[in-house]
Image (cartoon, rainbow, N blue to C red):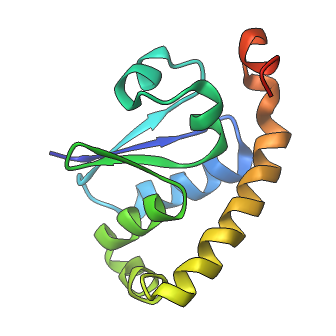
């Protein structure tokens, strides 16, 4: 069963990175754009805001978000296995996690116009 990767295709930075992964990966992944995708909300049991805020994957039936989601992706792409090994080390993972959260937050602010009106009012 492929790993489902939920990403924001309308974010230029997100799209650039995911397109890079698509080019160098095999059929281990199913790439799912979350933009206006109600099915993604159902599959992940995440809100529109949560999906827009972070990268998510479903691996072995488990929804994983944020920096841990990147580790899952990197673990399956030969060119990035070294990043998986490096950032799996606890102190380095913590640095990666918090750095990702800051960057992801600013990308979220940049792209939150995508949220529907009901979701925007809860931010």
| Relative image position of residue 66 (x, y in whole percent) | 54, 56
Q: Quadrant of the C terminus?
A: top right
In depth, the one of 32 and 89 nearer the eye is 89
Task: Pick the residue in front: 13 or 108.
Answer: 108
Viewer-nearest residue: 26 or 117: 117
Q: Residue furthest left?
A: 1
Q: Residue at x 76, y 61 (%)?
A: 103
Quadrant housing residue 61: top left
Judge whether residue 30 can be spotted in this image. Answer: yes
Q: In the rendering, at what x and y percent does residue 82 appear? A: 40, 87
Is residue 9 shown to the viewer in this render? no
Q: Is 87 located above or below residue 19 in the figure?
A: below
User: Which residue is outermost to the top?
Assistant: 118
Q: Is residue 120 left or right of residue 87?
A: right
Residue that appears at 29% across and 68% down: 76
Quarter of the image that includes the N terminus: top left
Q: Residue at x 68, y 34 (%)?
A: 10
Query: x and y percent of residue 2 in the render?
Result: 22, 47
Q: How many marks?
A: 0
Residue at 41%, 79% (x, y): give it. 84
Q: Is residue 102 above or below residue 110?
A: below
In this rendering, position of residue 104 left or right of residue 54: right
Q: State the image coordinates of residue 75 (x, y, percent, origin top left).
A: 32, 72
Q: Is residue 9 above or below residue 87?
A: above
Q: Seen in the image, is 9 located left or right of residue 44?
A: right
């Amino acid at each position: 069963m492929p790993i489902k990767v939920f990403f924001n295709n309308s974010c230029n930075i997100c799209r650039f990175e995911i397109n890079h992964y698509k080019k160098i990966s095999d059929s281990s992944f199913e790439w799912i754009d979350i933009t206006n995708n109600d099915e993604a909300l159902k599959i992940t049991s995440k809100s529109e805001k949560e999906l827009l805020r972070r990268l998510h994957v479903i691996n072995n039936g488990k929804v994983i978000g944020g920096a841990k989601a990147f580790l899952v992706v990197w673990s399956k792409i030969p060119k990035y296995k070294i990043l998986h090994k490096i950032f799996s080390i606890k102190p380095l993972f913590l640095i990666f996690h918090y750095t990702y959260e800051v960057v992801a937050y600013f990308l979220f602010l940049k792209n939150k116009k995508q949220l529907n009106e009901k979701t925007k009012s809860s931010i």
